[in-house]
Image: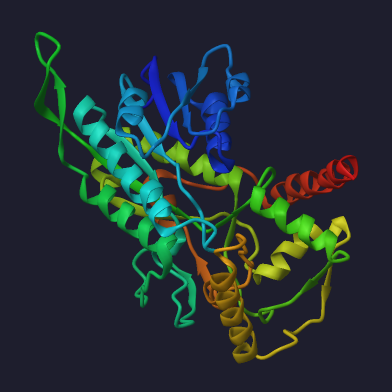
Amino acid sequence: MSGTAGQVYLVTGGCGFLGKHLVRMLAENGEGISEIRAFDLRPDREIETLSTDAVRVKFIEGDITDYSNVREAVRGVDVVINSAALVDIWGKNPPSKIWAVNYHGTCNVLEACKELGVQYLLHTSTMEVVGPNMKGDHFIRGNEETEYNVQNTGPYAQSKAEAEKLVLQANGEKVKVKGRRGSQVEGQKTLVTCALRPTGIYGEHNALMANLYRELVSCGRRRLRLAKKEVEHARVYVGNVAWMHLLAARALQRTPDILGGQAYFCYDDSPYLSYEDFDMELLGPCGIRMLGQRPPLPFCALYLLALLAEVLCWLLRPLVNFNPALNRHTLRIVTTAFTVRTDKAARHFGYRPLVPWTESKARTTNWAQSLDAEMSKKQ
């Protein structure tokens, strides 16, 4: 039960953008948690400084694609939050690597939970398991029951969709418990799983936003518009994503009959805007300016440019790792409206955003402004 003293949580991908916010949220607000294990391939001992008087944060270096690493990290854990993922819609990594992390890594987590008797697994999915699809069908203020022509395209969306399906189908499967002599035997305990689907996550220390900002600075702090202003998207602050995870992890134990096997969109009260206009809300105070109020080229011309960029990437791959931000997949995402509601999460486990939009915006903008000082030091 949530609130039981001495619980141990494992956060896979615990040193990543979302993972680190998750660890901090659990350490500061995790009632009844005594230890949080941050499992990640990248060494980051700084994560352990998030420890509090009540909660110990422990870094565990390991590879989610290696079952022996995952098994050792899971041993003795009460709740697993599987947030490890390789987010790649630009083709920077081979599909085999994306599948290895996102799907086979999730397989390893599930198997370790069942083998070692861990009942509660909260999986970080993504809105891309639903859309936007590559046909350009808009999804307006939809929820988990809204009908939509789901067409997972590309290794990232496909691997995450299959991983989510695997996790939700595992709900109710039996897990092993210790026998009299310490052996693992199948008992009456069952696995309780659910998945959260964040929309586009923003916030301080987001490497993708940092890269975007540096590129815009190098382009004279000007940004070209690709989508019409009315093509709205739902973006969500990382602190609220972490908060929803904490609430869901508690409720997964308290009301497993409600959350077990369920998926939830993860969004807050950030404004519905186009990708470019939303980024301008955050980066405009940093001196970034938008070029024009409408796209300078029709969609068919932009589509041709995206296709040419993909061909050029393919031709240059033997010589250089060229991965342009614009490809047909990213163009469709930007130009297809996708907005969601989180009424299901509110009903099932009382989710309400913890950090209001004004504060989310201020935190992100202040962090982005600090990047100028970092860039000046490197020059």
Residue 330 seen anywhere in this rendered image of the structure? no
Q: Residue at x 66, y 48 (%)?
A: 207
* Quarter of the image that includes the C terminus: top right
Query: What is the tally of numbered marks visible in this picture?
Result: 0
Image x and y of residue 253, in percent:
31, 33
Most extreme residue toward the front is 319
- For the residue pair 295 and 148, the one nearer the viewer reads as 295
**In the image, is residue 229 above or below residue 35?**
below
Residue at left 15%, top 11%? Answer: 182
Colour scheme employed for the rendering of this structure: rainbow
Residue 303 is at least partly visible in this image = yes
Report the quarter where the N terminus lies. top left
Place of residue 203 in the rendered image (x, y in percent of width and height, measured from the top left):
66, 48
User: Relative to residue 352, is residue 76 depicted above or below?
Assistant: above
Picture residue at 51% right of the left edge, 29% below the top: 26
Please state the horizontal and vertical placement of residue 290, each as a whole percent of the image.
Answer: 82, 72
Left or right for 31, reference 114: right
Percent of width and height locating residue 15? 55, 34
Hey, which quadrant is residue 96 in on the image?
A: bottom left
Q: Judge left or right: residue 194 versus residue 378.
A: left
Is 67 in front, or is 255? 67
In this picture, residue 258 sits left or right of residue 51: left
* Side of 94 where 301 appears, left or right: right
Task: Kindly give the residue lying farthest to the top in the view shown.
Answer: 181
Q: Identify which residue is drawn at 47% across, 46% down.
A: 351
Nearer to us in this view, 298 or 352: 298
